[in-house]
Image: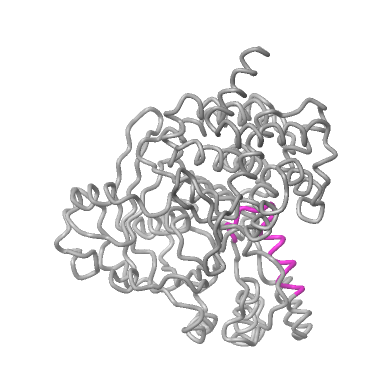
Amino acid sequence: MILSRYTLRNVDAEKVVIPQEALFELPEKVLQFGTGVLLRGLPDYFIDKANRQGIFGGRIVVVKSTSHGDTSAFDKQDCLYTLCVRGLQNGEKVEENIINSSISRVLTATEEWEQVLECAHNAQMQIIISNTTEVGIQLVNDDVRHHPPKSFPGKLLAFLHERYKAFEGSEHSGMVIVPTELIPENGTKLQAIVLELAHLNGLEDAFIEWVECCNYFCNSLVDRIVPGKPDVSTVSSLESELGYTDGLLAVSEVYRLWAIEGDDHIKNILSFAQVDEGIVIEPNIDIFRELKLRMLNGTHTLSCGLAYLAGCETVKSAMDDETVSNFITDVMQQEIAPSIPYDVDLGTAHDFGNKVLDRFRNPHIQHQWLSITMNYSSKLRLRCVPVLLKHYEKSEDVPEAFALGFAAYLYFMKAVTERDGKYYGELDGASYYIQDELAETFYHRWSKLSPAELVKEVLHDVAYWGEDLYSLPGFAEAVTQNLNSIINSGVRKSIEIANSKKVVAA
């Protein structure tokens, strides 16, 4: 039995929370750019929860912006999907299965752009949410008259322009826009790009003023581990328990946080925030952002290549591996925590880190390291390099774990094969896909440079990193030494050597 609105009558309500029929009749109030599991596991989770409690009373139109994949799974299932929440909360085991009915329809931007623009004419639609990955919020010289524009900011600008025309620039027709892309000040940056694009497209001054004055671009931070599609055995076990098949089934941890920068007006529009303590709407959310961005995401980024190359497929398996787990703990608590580029008390950082390590150990979350390596270079630049620079502001001692993590990044980026414009590395005779904007660059670097030369060229790349990392005392030497160790002795041995140095030093 496939999950759908029609088959809900046959689902066991003791095993899963089933939406009431009235929820399908709620008006569309949210436009969401992105179909990914993070959006479905956090913002959409909150909206569905509020709808079930009779508070928000609105559904989501999802826009699929990318060309890969299709919407057939959503179409087959009437946009229903199951979220299985697993983990511990206050020491208590939590297992909850919820059929989420918050999504009304999914539109493909390339084929259904007119329908997306029609949503701008809906007076009840007041909220826009996005997660287009960290590279989605970038200025591209885009023509907003294309159907659709090629970039996310271009699509957003075209939608806002349609909204402006539909309501003749009414002050009350502005939108609350909450990007969830994991970059600092995501709302502020998105607004700046949209306004610049408006000028580049020669749009009228009155419209630009309306964008600035009547729309609210909120900085926000999301924090919940929602891995990609669960493995076959997990899906099979869950579907057997639930009694139906679900092509969109997702598993999330219990922990959840959506911190949004806003005032009472934002709280009023985002009324779903009332239903869960995991939603925080405050005038300043910097401390939430910095702790999460550096301690959780930064640790993920500095560990992903190394853990994968050491033979650990998931975060949980790495935490079960004493050698790799020691590295993860060291890089987080000993090197990242003291060098967060924000005024955070070290005790607060360590407490947050201990919670993150517990989340990494959650046996129900199979978070693939290879998925975390997506956009590896930009994640390293945005999440980790500011920590490295802060470290060197305070000390000239080399952050040894950071240097090892950086060396593992360089080795992971060693593409040995190119097929149809995609680049693949190799581990134990099997290839892995390098999904990174610098994949081609590294393919050429590795083909012509020695390890020492490669380290020098990469660290000298001021245009990419924003700083000359080669000038940091001892860092280039440490990265080169670790890279040679990885090449000659393997990743696991290199971690063991690094761990032994820590023990000797202690």
Occupied quadrant, residue 264: bottom right
- Is residue 185 rendered magenta in the image? yes
* Residue plotted at (28% across, 72% down): 76
Magenta segment boundaries in residue numbering: 179-196
Q: Nearer the viewer, residue 212 or 62?
A: 62
Q: Nearer the viewer, residue 158 or 438?
A: 438
Q: Nearer the viewer, residue 4 or 23?
A: 4
172 relative position to 203: left or right: left
Q: Percent from the top left, x then y, of residue 300? A: 56, 41
Q: Percent from the top left, x then y, of residue 51? A: 38, 60
Q: Percent from the top left, x then y, of residue 407? A: 65, 39
* Residue plotted at (78% across, 25% down): 397
Q: Is residue 406 above or below residue 267?
A: above
Q: Percent from the top left, x then y, of residue 165? A: 63, 87
Q: Nearer the viewer, residue 439 or 70?
A: 439
Q: Is residue 405 above or below residue 110?
A: above
